[in-house]
Amino acid sequence: MFKGHPKGLYVLFFTEMWERFGFYITISIFVFYLQSNFGWDETQATNVYGILIAFVYFTPIIGGWIADNFLGYGKSIMIGAVILGAGYAIMAIPTETAGLVYVAIAIICLGNGLFKANISVLVGNLYSHTQGSLKDAGYNIFYMGINIGAFYAPIAAASIRNFFVENYGVTQAQGYNAAFALAAIGMIISLLIFTVFRKFYVDADYRSKERVNVNVDLQLTKQQEKDRIIALLIIFAIVIFFWMSFHQNGAALSLFARDYTDSVVGKYVYSLFDVFGLHAIIAILLGTAALIKSQSSKAKMIGGFFTLLGLVVLIVRLNSYPESNSIEPERFFSFNAMFIVLLTPLIVGYFAFLNKKGKEPSSPGKIGIGMVLTGLSFLIMVFASFGLPAVYTIEGPSPITVSPFWLITTYFGLTLAELHLSPMGLSFVSKVAPAKFKGLLMGGWFGATAAGNYLSGFVGRYYQNWELWQFFLLLVVTSFIAAGLVALFLKKLKSATQ
């Protein structure tokens, strides 16, 4: 999985990991913070959430254009990192007026615009146009970095909030302010990694005067450029439906976790939500995989060590838990990221196996599969919602709740969908975009994400006004429609890379 990749990939991996740590702290608690601090209802809070995640992904279009034409990718990323840190620091300031929050949102969106698309361009620039399959795997590895940060973010957010609330007597809202401060610290670490280890990726910054070698991009005719741009615009339009559904993780799914999911569980289920218990389970899974998969005795020994260590820690933790344990709704946010870290090696290996047999789906084909998996994932929530009272008939947590495993299973399905779609989309843009428009068109991918993110907040109003199963069925239908559109245009999309 890691063989043959340039060293610069791992610098960008850790840079993005810490940036996403700060970002996912923010969005995992954003709706809860707005409700706790300002007393807003679900409709108002999810609408502002939709605005945040829409503009935070719309501004990369502008940031990509600025990098293409003025600053270059490296400088844009550095400036963006500084601005992002400032935005999170403002969110850490306790306030009774929403105006300061809107100022912070604007600053975060500006910083993300300069950072997000351009670091994705650098990843693609590490590879030549002839390394298509390796580039796909490179984006999968890069995506793991994103989700390691995303995995720890909600755990850190819940832990620091609880620490300040329980030990210093602050309000819940002020506990969230402390979590935003931690997001700002994450951006400082991200910036340090990116600047200190610059020599490993400098050749990928095509505008940099210090570059020595350049992976020359494929020369295209005007008609080829036009065909490729049209193909990308088709993909952008289709993936809007995915992000509209997927980013319910910070809106409808988070509210479902808080109001409709059992918050008191037994010690065996609680091990999935406890930091030490969850890491022990991960160590067991990864260690066992190494024992089965590895060829060398040294790798098997390391795998056996982690398996044994995980078992010991898990047994000790299980004996320390009480029979009944309370879980915070933020904890569910970690499952998507955890599943990505665990499943990425399996998905990359599966695609490599298909590639050897000449049966690996094209990048657009993988995106279509991802949309089918998205629809199936929310179909789980349709079944989970039957029998629950309508949102508009209750105030506060529902008197009827369901098992946490409904949400966990949904996150598992969404993770499989995301691994087929998001890193493949980044790779597709990098492979198809004409060289002089790379930053702009990578920004276009995030612009499509922005449109979907805004719609996630827009349709979020129906979560409060419809029966729960009706709301989730809407996401099932839109996902299957998007999958159908991929199938309809698949031949044209595949021809764009030839």
Image (spheres, helix red, strand yellow):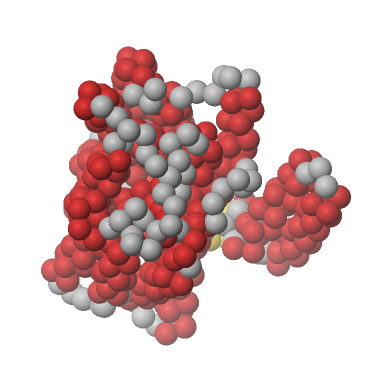
In screen coordinates, is 376 left or right of 77? right
Quadrant of residue 187 within the rendered picture: bottom left
Residue at image coords 63%, 25%:
356
Residue at image coords 29%, 36%:
434
For residue 218, above or below residue 114: above
Quadrant of residue 425 within the rendered picture: top left
Q: Relative to the observer, which residue lies in front, 2 or 145?
A: 2
x%, y% of residue 315?
Answer: 76, 60
For residue 307, above or below residue 92: above
x%, y% of residue 191?
Answer: 39, 70
x%, y% of residue 182?
Answer: 40, 73
In screen coordinates, is 433 left or right of 329? left
Q: Quadrant of the N terminus?
A: top right
Is any part of residue 335 visible from this angle? no
x%, y% of residue 481?
Answer: 31, 21
Is any part of residue 249 visible from this angle? yes
For residue 116, above or below residue 409: below
